């Protein structure tokens, strides 16, 4: 059984990137869904069964401190933190955020400082620690492979998150929602203990101006940073032309691709070509949005198909088309091991059973401007009345956009924040219409809703179009496991001994 933390006793940093020898490419990649939905219990359940379990790294720092403030049920965060190789960082985080009896009723969660271009060392470190703990727990006690999923669009925490995951020997890094051209170079730099930089996207910069994000591992160790295994890198793409660009022009090695269609959950790529006339109409995808699999095969790198692939027939079709396998999110999202709060799972699975489930590709919901798949469910902010009643705020800030102020300073705005605040920062009021606070809603999805004066933050579920056809798999069940999903997809006996 492999130690889930690499040996860091050798503090030298040779100029050679080492990628650990991995097994054959997995057939099934479990989707990296939302904040905490694909948490360590789900990733571990998939990984120990020989496929690629994936943890979500987005918002992992805020989720980590909320788990601690809820008393760390099971002691998992504290157990993982004891293995973090910089003990002072773990001790400081536990001292500040762990509440042995949890929060008193009605007391809001204490928040981490919102990410900015420049943050102090401790803000970076708690993100490193959170990412480490999530990967460590997913890998604990077995030899399976584990990946982490991040959104390219959520730039500010990504460097610290990647570094923390690499300390825990993450096997794969998966990134979508943008063009992660610089990430291979980041992995190469971190593997040998060097600083890494990325271009920082800032609205309003002059043509000759640029901004960078920098993360230096040497700021966190009392000795030279250790060498670390480099994870394999899989960008998520929605066009074969982007895959070709990344394969040729990324600043380091790309190891394969996840080819995601518009039926996948979460953020979708906008349709290519002319958009709908109606601003709030669902985007219409056409032939230009279909990825050319002949072109993908010609790149000579493994690829996995995602979006509408949650069936054994889709797996066979993908393999016949030359794919290594499939990425599946929706089926795993409602399994017993996923992080979705149990009553929400039950409500959605009951709607699946009764043929009442509805999904909408909402072009406005996400402050990022990307279309976002929404499960229409009462008492969530997919309900217009619940959305209208919610007081707008932006206190987590992962989806903010950076912009240059007239005085030259960098500031941040989010189309989901209070309208007056957004307009004062130079935003256009019309751009706030229909925008939802995904950061807070996704925390609510997993049972960590922030407490407000008028109650708890409402949830907002996302799922792929596979949810509409999931009754074929669930057969009326309101509870199933990740093993059941794998058995269904691979044609093997499920956890209850029934061949699906």
Image (cartoon, rainbow, N blue to C red):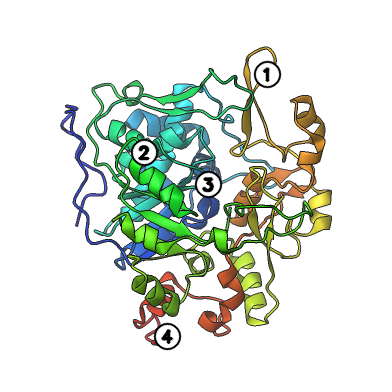
Residue drawn at point x = 53 percent, y = 24 percent: 117
x and y percent of residue 480 in the render? 49, 75
Of marks 3 and 1, which one's residue comes earlier in the chain? 3
What's the CA distance linking mark 4 and mark 3?
Answer: 34 Å
Badge number at residue 470: none
Quadrant of the snapshot with the C terminus: bottom left
Q: Quadrant of residue 386?
A: bottom right
Quadrant of the snapshot with the N terminus: bottom left
x and y percent of residue 495 in the render? 38, 79
Give the structural element (helix, strand or loop) at label 1. Answer: loop
Image marks 3 and 1: residues in contact by CB distance under 8 Å: no
Of marks 1 and 2, which one's residue comes earlier in the chain? 2
Q: In this picture, is 20 found above or below 208?
A: below
x and y percent of residue 179 in the render? 47, 42
Of marks 4 and 1, which one's residue comes earlier in the chain? 1
Left or right for 159, reference 15: right
Residue at the disc numbered 2 = 249
What's the CA distance linking mark 3 and mark 1?
Answer: 26 Å
Residue at the disc numbered 3 = 177
Badge number at residue 405: 1
Q: Quadrant of residue 207?
A: top right
Q: In this picture, is 467 found above or below 369?
A: below
What's the CA distance linking mark 4 and mark 1?
Answer: 58 Å
x and y percent of residue 242 in the render? 45, 48
What's the CA distance linking mark 2 and mark 4?
Answer: 43 Å
Image marks 2 and 3: residues in contact by CB distance under 8 Å: no
Of marks 2 and 3, which one's residue comes earlier in the chain? 3
Residue at the disc numbered 4 = 500
Residue drawn at point x = 42 percent, y = 59 percent: 41
């Amino acid at each position: 059984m492999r130690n889930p933390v690499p040996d860091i006793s050798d503090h030298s940093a040779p100029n050679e990137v080492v990628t650990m020898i991995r097994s054959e490419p997995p057939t099934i990649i479990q989707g990296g869904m939302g904040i905490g939905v694909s948490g360590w219990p789900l990733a571990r359940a998939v990984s120990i069964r020989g496929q690629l379990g994936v943890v979500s790294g987005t918002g992992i720092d805020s989720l980590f401190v909320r788990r601690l403030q809820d008393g760390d049920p099971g002691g998992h965060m504290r157990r993982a933190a004891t293995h973090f190789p910089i003990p002072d960082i773990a001790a400081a985080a536990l001292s500040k955020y762990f509440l042995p009896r949890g929060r008193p009723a009605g007391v809001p969660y204490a928040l981490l400082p919102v990410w900015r271009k420049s943050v102090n060392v401790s803000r970076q470190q708690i993100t490193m620690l959170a990412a480490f703990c999530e990967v460590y727990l997913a890998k604990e006690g077995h030899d399976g492979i584990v990946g982490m999923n991040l959104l390219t669009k959520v730039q500010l925490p990504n460097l610290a998150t990647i570094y923390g995951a690499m300390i825990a020997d993450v096997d794969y890094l998966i990134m979508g929602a943008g063009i992660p051209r610089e990430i291979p170079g980041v992995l190469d730099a971190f593997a040998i203990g060097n600083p890494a930089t990325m271009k920082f996207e800032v609205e309003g910069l002059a043509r000759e101006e640029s901004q960078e994000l920098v993360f230096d591992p040497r700021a966190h160790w009392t000795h030279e940073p250790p060498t670390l295994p480099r994870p394999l890198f899989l960008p998520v793409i929605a066009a074969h032309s982007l895959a070709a660009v990344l394969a040729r022009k990324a600043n380091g090695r790309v190891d394969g691709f996840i080819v995601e269609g518009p039926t996948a959950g979460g953020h979708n790529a906008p349709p290519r070509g002319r958009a709908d006339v109606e601003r709030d109409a669902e985007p219409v995808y056409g032939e230009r949005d279909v990825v050319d699999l002949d072109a993908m095969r010609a790149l000579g790198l493994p690829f996995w198909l995602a979006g509408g692939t949650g069936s054994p027939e889709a797996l066979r079709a993908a393999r016949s088309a030359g794919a290594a396998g499939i990425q599946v999110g929706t089926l795993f999202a409602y399994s017993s091991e996923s992080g979705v709060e149990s009553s929400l799972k039950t409500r959605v699975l009951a709607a699946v059973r009764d043929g009442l489930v509805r999904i909408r590709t909402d072009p406005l919901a996400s402050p990022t401007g990307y279309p976002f798949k929404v499960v229409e469910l009462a008492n969530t902010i997919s309900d217009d009345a619940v959305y209208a009643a919610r007081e707008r705020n932006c206190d987590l800030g992962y989806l903010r956009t950076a912009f240059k102020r007239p005085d030259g300073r960098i500031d941040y705005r989010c189309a989901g924040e209070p309208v007056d605040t957004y307009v004062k920062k130079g935003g256009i009021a019309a751009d706030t219409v229909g925008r939802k606070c995904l950061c807070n809603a996704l925390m609510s999805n997993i049972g960590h809703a922030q407490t407000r004066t008028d109650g708890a933050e409402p949830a907002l579920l996302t799922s792929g179009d596979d949810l509409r056809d999931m009754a074929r798999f669930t057969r009326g069940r309101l509870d199933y496991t990740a093993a059941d999903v794998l058995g269904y997809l691979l044609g093997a006996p499920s956890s209850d001994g029934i061949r699906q």
